[in-house]
Image (spheres, coloured by chain):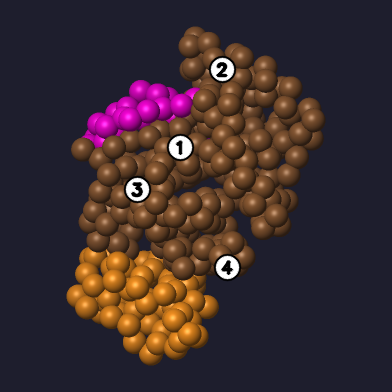
Amino acid sequence: MRPDLSPVSLYSRGGVVSPSVKGQEWYQADDVAEEYDDKRFSRGGQLIDRREKTAVLEALAPLDDRRVLEIACGTGRFTTMMADRGADVVGLDISSAMLQQGRAKAVQMDVADRLEFLRGDAGRLPFPDDHFDTVVAMRFFHLADDPESFLREMRRVSREQIVFDTFNRFSARSVYNWALPMGSRLYSKSEVAVLLAKTDLTLRGVEDDFIVPYGLYRSMPNVLAEPIRTVDRAVGSLSAADHLASVSYWNTKVR
Amino acid sequence: MNESLLEILRCPLDKAELTLEDAEYDGDEIVSGTLVCTECGERYPIEDGIPNLLPPDMREGTPA
């Protein structure tokens, strides 16, 4: 579902100012285990990977025995992490090749007993109503042509929570959007608010991050990415800069 | 896939329960077989241990 060049996104202020020790532990474990993702998230991309995972962990905590479905799980970057933290996870993707990577990773990380993968369509989920506690969809909505129908279907199978990200309209991302293999769908805050209202979801929290477009981070060595990240963070902490953010993380509750 | 996954899988078209046919196992894992909808009869293959619950119009070889 995700093209190789799909945009990368990142998360909230708290985790960056004071990175959690737990977060660093899992990141390093992943770094050892995931040669595949290592290619994609090398250099500046490591920052993004780390922050994005922290965003998911914080939104879902505590993960113990939580039933989680991840939509468009790709190679299992999040599913393996969530299973490692004690959640019972199902990863759904359209691509068989991606899922085989995910399975190999699950075996490597010794989490295969609490993680299942299957191929399926995000718009027609093969699960009963209200089965999962949480549905996660990272880097998915920028590829969705009809976000309302996808969100509605996610809500059908979620009992409690839906966590997803969007790339924002009017952000610096617009500038290089043309370079993506397929047009990315960008959202304004009010569009997402309307979507939530239509699908009976209540906003628990939203975090904005990464004013500098992700493409810069990915092509940059860490030694350069860190200082730029610091500037980015300083600008991002001003409330007036919120509408410039490239990515938003939405933590929503089923009504 | 583990057999326990079968309990939560439903037909993507009508959300009815599925039954497992022609299952081959490797230990506790189901490596191949077919999931059949108890309502509409649609068949979903298990390929290399991964169930393919894509609706028929989205499977390989299906004209767009």
Q: Percent from the top left, x then y, of residue A226?
A: 72, 27
Q: Mark 3 = which residue?
A: A134
Answer yes or no: are tags 3 and 2 on the same subunit: yes
Q: Earlier in the sequence, mark 2 or mark 1?
A: 1
Q: CA distance from mark 2 to mark 1?
A: 19 Å
Distance, label 4 to label 2, CA atoms, is: 39 Å
Rendered view: B36 above or below A93: below
Q: Is A204 left, or right, of A58 in this rendering? A: left
Within 10 Å of the Cα at label 3, are there few (<14), some (14-19), or many (20+) other Cα atoms? Answer: many
Q: Secondary structure at mark 1?
A: helix
In space, the residues marked 1 and 3 are separated at their CA atoms by 13 Å
Under tag 4, what secondary structure?
helix
The spot of residue A163 in percent (x, y) is: 39, 40
Residue drawn at point x = 45 percent, y = 37 percent = A58
| Residue A58 disc label | 1
- Compute the Cα span from label 3 to label 2: 28 Å
Cα gap from disc 3 to disc 4, whole angstroms: 23 Å
Q: Is residue A89 at all visible to an observer of this figure?
A: yes
Residue B62 relative to residue A34: left or right:
left
**In contact (CB < 8 Å): disc 4 and disc 2:** no
Q: How many marks?
A: 4
Amino acid type shown at disc 1: Glu
> For mark 4, what is the residue?
A107
Chain brown in the figure, letter = A
- Provide the residue span drawn in magenta: A184-208
Judging from the image, mark 2 belongs to the subunit labelled: A
Residue at 71%, 22% in the rendered image: A228
Task: Report if residue A168 is visible in the image.
Answer: no
Residue lying at 73% horizontally and 51% vertically, measured from the top left: A39
Q: Are marks 3 and 4 in contact (CB under 8 Å)?
A: no
**Residue type at numbered disc 4:** Val
Residue matched to label 2:
A236
